[in-house]
Image (spheres, rainbow, N blue to C red):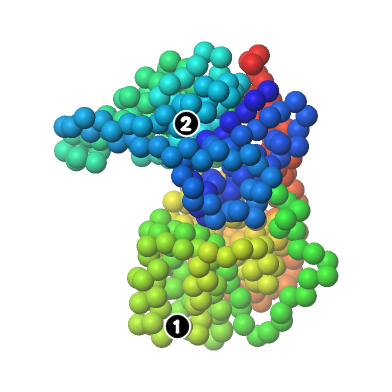
Amino acid sequence: MKVVHVIPSLLKGGAERLCIDICNELRTREGIEIKLVVLSKENLYSEFTESIGIMHCPVTFNLSLSRKNEIDISSYSNFIEAYQPNVVHSHLYLAEIISRENTSEKTNYFTHLHDNMPQLLKGTAATFLSKGKITNYFERTRLLKKYAKCNNQFISISKDTSSYFNENLPRNLRNITLLQNAINLSQFSRPKNWIKKNDENIKLISVGSLVNKKNHLFLIDVVESLIKKGLNPQLSILGEGHNRELLETTIEDKKLEKHIHLKGNVNKVEEFLWDADIYVHSASYEPFGLVLLEAMAAGIPCVSIDGGGNRDIIINDENGFIIEKGNTELFTESAVRLYKDEVLRQKIVFNALKYVSNFGIKEYVDKLISIYTREEL
């Protein structure tokens, strides 16, 4: 069976990381040939992609309501025509519109629903009052026709995302299978010989792109609240993005430079997790929360805002804490409890490790292959 995964780029992100882990596991399976098609040459995950057969297929795809469309996907189309895959599995929106432009009856098509794609939101009267929403509606109409033509199948990462697409896809296209994300458990499991630095600081860590939906300004408020409670918090934020300048300015204005550290994109995220006390997750919208699984596997407890999809992961006061949006005080109190109450901390960590053991990439790929082969390929 020939399987092609298609993704726009290999920048730091949960969707990209999951795609790489899937490909690395698929290549070990007998009878499966795997190719990863990337629509640009950006790759911040080079240490994890050395063994994957990567095809770089630069494309142009600009639809216009008023001018001629600019479409050049020949590099992708030529590769697919020559390779003749049994399965095309696409990740993120650009990969959707490119890989569905020209489909084959000999290929099964799978869309990975990593988030609630606004481009597929069904139209309302308000749609036609916004240029951006009109463009989305135009692209949506085109893509839905392509989905219908190739009998497209969808893989959803959470109950929240499944609900969104059941509401927004036409009834004839609601072929959605829930398959929650997974991680390479061995990578994030803390080695027995790892020596954690012990000090009097409460060490917090958060991983995510510096963009609005990750809501890092909330964590600055949490740090201030912890200081008022007499603690010495040290927050490391791993990730990069266009909000860096805003965060730097806010940290400087509040004189928190000694407490909050913007680390940027890093290699070996797991080592930062192993040295932390608590993982703090502030995203106001979270399709699933792959990094929460990583933190659980690393053996550190999680405090997270309720972002929707992460309800699939965190059972409040059992394997972590999930807090309503905007409740800084409760978020802070939960972190303090985990830091000061060793019995509570051990319970949360034990339950989290037991829970995350069900989210290994090997078992995930077993399920994925069964989805691929439901119909004879």
Rendering quarter of residue 316: bottom right
Tell which tag, 1 or 2, sits nearer the viewer.
2
At a point 21% along the width and 30% down the height, the residue shown is 68
Q: Which residue bears the numbered disc 2?
A: 76
Looking at the rendering, in which quadrant would you find the C terminus? Answer: top right
Q: Is residue 330 above or below residue 255?
A: above
Helix, strand or loop status at disc 1 = loop
Where is residue 39 drawn, in percent x and y?
A: 46, 40
Q: Amino acid at mark 1?
A: Leu
User: Toward the viewer: 342 or 359?
Assistant: 359
Tag 2 or tag 1, which sits nearer the N-term?
2
Q: Residues within 10 Å of mark 2 (few under 14, many from 20)?
A: many
Name the quadrant containing residue 181: top right
Is 180 situated left or right of 250 in this image?
right
Q: Quadrant of the N terminus?
A: top right
In the picture of the structure, the residue carrying the numbered disc 1 is 256
At a point 64% along the width and 55% down the height, the residue shown is 47
